[in-house]
Amino acid sequence: MSQTVTEAPATTEPRGGKAALSEGKKAERRLGLLLCAPAAIVMLAVTGYPIAYSIWLSLQRYDLRFPAERQFVGLDNYVAVLSNSYWWTAFGTTMFLTVVSVAIELVLGMALALIMHRTLVGRGLVRTVTLVPYGIVTVVAAFSWFYAWTPETGYLANALAGDGAPLTEQWPSLWIIILAEVWKTTPFMALLLMAGLALVPDDLLKAASMDGANAWQRFTKVMVPVMKPAILVALLFRTLDAFRIFDNIFVLTKGANDTSSVSMQTYNNLIKGLNLGIGSTMSVLIFITVALIAFVFIKVFGTAAPGSDQGGKR
Amino acid sequence: MAEIVLDKVTKRYPDGALAVSDMDIEIADGEFVILVGPSGCGKSTALNMIAGLEDISSGELRIDGQRANEKAPKDRDIAMVFQSYALYPHMSVRENMAFPLRLAKVDDATVKQKVEEAAEILDLTQHLDRRPSNLSGGQRQRVAMGRAIVRSPKAFLMDEPLSNLDAKLRGQMRTSVSKLQKQLGTTTVYVTHDQTEAMTLGDRVVVLRGGIVQQIGSPQFLYDHPANLFVAGFIGSPSMNFVPATLEEGVLKSPLGTITLTDRVRRLAEAADAPREVVAGIRPEHFEDAALVEETHRASGATFTAPVDVLESMGAEKYAYFTVEEELATTAELQELAADAGATDVPGGGSTIVTRLSASSEAREGQQLQVWFDADRIQLFDPSSGRNLTYSG
Ligand SMILES: Nc1ncnc2c1ncn2[C@@H]1O[C@H](COP(=O)(O)OP(=O)(O)O)[C@@H](O)[C@H]1O
Ligand SMILES: [Mg+2]
């Protein structure tokens, strides 16, 4: 019995094997496709179509103020955007905000995750308190930061800024934006990292203690490497999110003093400027950058795509 | 090399659970000591306190005569092998074994040499560059051992290191653990719930129940002279048979018949002030098919006749199971033992007597058999306290 089973594919693979398999396999595949179809169609409708449409728009000169001049211009819009210094300033600002805020979030998030993981008393309270910022609508939080930093009326401005108006200068503004971002999204980072911490078996840390590791060595040599997949996923999520930063900047500075992000630029061109061609080009460029970031994370760092089996091979 | 002393060591967990109470153990340099007991009796807790992974609530732990209660695990120079092996999944076998040495800032050449020596001893040389996840259970277990031995610690602590292996491998590894310990001569505390491991491995065995030390002694001593019902029932496989009995003037009335005690047993029982109601314990190996017992020998024992319920022929010996009319003795200790062995759901009230007969016995299932047992090997226990009334330590 077992012999025929093991031999069959080896000898008859090209013809018989395939034919024997095909009936059941085909039906199964058809069922699989059918089951996926509704989700796939919805996905296509809500993401595929807008993306395709943006790409299509980005290849045209199309300004709603001059609708008559609409015409297909190939990659001209891309040349225009990529040779524009505003775009590159915004790109640099976005990159800076992304890298700095994600780095700070990682450190703080890890600290919070460790605290939440270790606390034995009042665990629920600690977690709730930690999550409060994440539960507040970004725009609302941004406005409270905005008022806090407004000279005369804001408590932070009064306490820290003296006579100046920090939100009218580039660097203070950038740091305030980072502060608002970090305050807002660190809890999310902490949650993702805490899920990762739960994956580190206690025995492993005990073994490391026995092997002579102090607390820091246990953290760096055992905990971090073992939870690396979770860290990478958290970083990926947050980087993609941070790169599209919009609401905090919109409320805090409106992009003044070179604090504009690429999403702000896109908004300014697309919605305010009504220039569908240039705006779409920018959104396509953002899309490409985000895709590149995801690619680098998954291919270079070996981040396990969320949902795929845990741990990856590294 | 180290001498480890536990002096009235007690562990109370923050939730109030008393896991270990007043544990007194003196472990000599180079000794192999086994902590054995049913699960939940506090073995791991005791071991973790020696390791420094759990705080000691009260009492003192001394390593080489120095108080070690407050020392961090890394400063105790003790290595530990975990049941789960706790290998670092992101490191190769070589890196796993080198980890303690690297932390101790040993130079590269020495690390390489020591790891390779350990790998040689444990037959891991060809696996050094593999990841733990690609190894078999037995190989992982050896890597865990390797990580413990590379740095020549003062002592080894092992928490059920063989429990995750299949029976055959466990037997093999048991032998190699024993050999390794003798070869290295390192003080070892080994935790297990398996009495076979306890009997075969250790120089001395500590039997624990509910966080309290029941008895400490060599395996043979515990087998011959259990201090109480619990130890008697725990040590030995298959375990001792217990029947309720009444003791009157040196005569024991039991479901196995009326037995005249030997002088030795009677004197011990008298000295211990035995009550009228007792529990009599007889090990399966102290029974024999009466037909195979020489006449001259017979007088020193008693016989009973009963139908054989089940007969297991093991080749070198036979196990015959009998049912006795009356309920078998039940005490708290025995119930705990039964629960631990997973025998709570044995049908028929659990009144089964297990006997070991010579292979040449002609016993048949379902047929009456006259069984002889050695009256001098009967042990009597106090049903209320569990104390061995025939203890001669
Ligand atoms: N962290 C803990 N907190 C509270 N009670 C515990 C803890 N760890 C173990 N215990 C309790 O202590 C007792 C002994 O546990 P343990 O030492 O793990 O037993 P063993 O290793 O002999 O199976 C058990 O009753 C267990 O429930
Ligand atoms: Mg245990």
Image (spheres, rainbow, N blue to C red):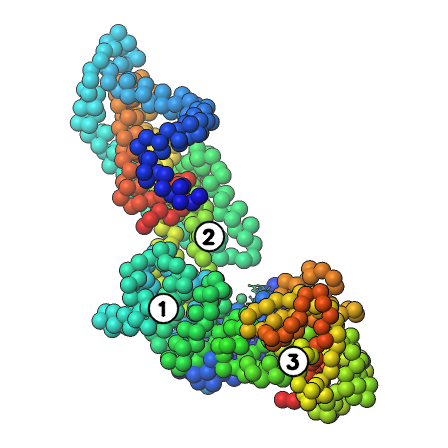
Q: Residue B28: image x %, image y %?
A: 47, 85
Q: Chain of mark 2?
A: A
Write down the residue under mark 3. B292
Q: Chain of mark 3?
A: B
Three-letter residue code for mark 3: Leu
Distance from label 3 to label 2 (Cα)? 63 Å
Q: Residue A139: image x %, image y %?
A: 44, 33
Q: Nearer the viewer, mark 1 or mark 3?
A: 3
Three-letter residue code for mark 1: Arg
Above or below B328: residue A228: above
Q: Residue at x 20, y 15 (%)?
A: A73
Horizontal side of residue A79 vs B273, given as left or right: left
Above or below B106: residue A174: above
In the drawing, what numbered circle is on residue A13? none
Do circles 3 and 2 both sit on a common chain?
A: no
Do circles 1 and 3 both sit on a common chain?
A: yes
Three-letter residue code for mark 2: Ala
Q: Residue at x 49, y 39 (%)?
A: A135
Residues under numbered marks 2 and 1 in contact, where contact means CB atoms less than 8 Å apart: no
Above or below A258: residue A197: below
User: Which quarter of the rendered picture does the N terminus of chain A lie within?
Assistant: top left
Write down the residue under mark 2. A198
Q: Secondary structure at mark 1?
A: helix
Above or below B56: residue A49: above
Using the rendered image of the protein, determine whether residue A214 is visible from the camera's viewpoint: no
Residue with the most extreme top position:
A68
Write down the residue under mark 1. B147
Q: Chain of mark 1?
A: B
Q: Residue at x 24, y 15 (%)?
A: A60
Q: Secondary structure at mark 3?
A: helix
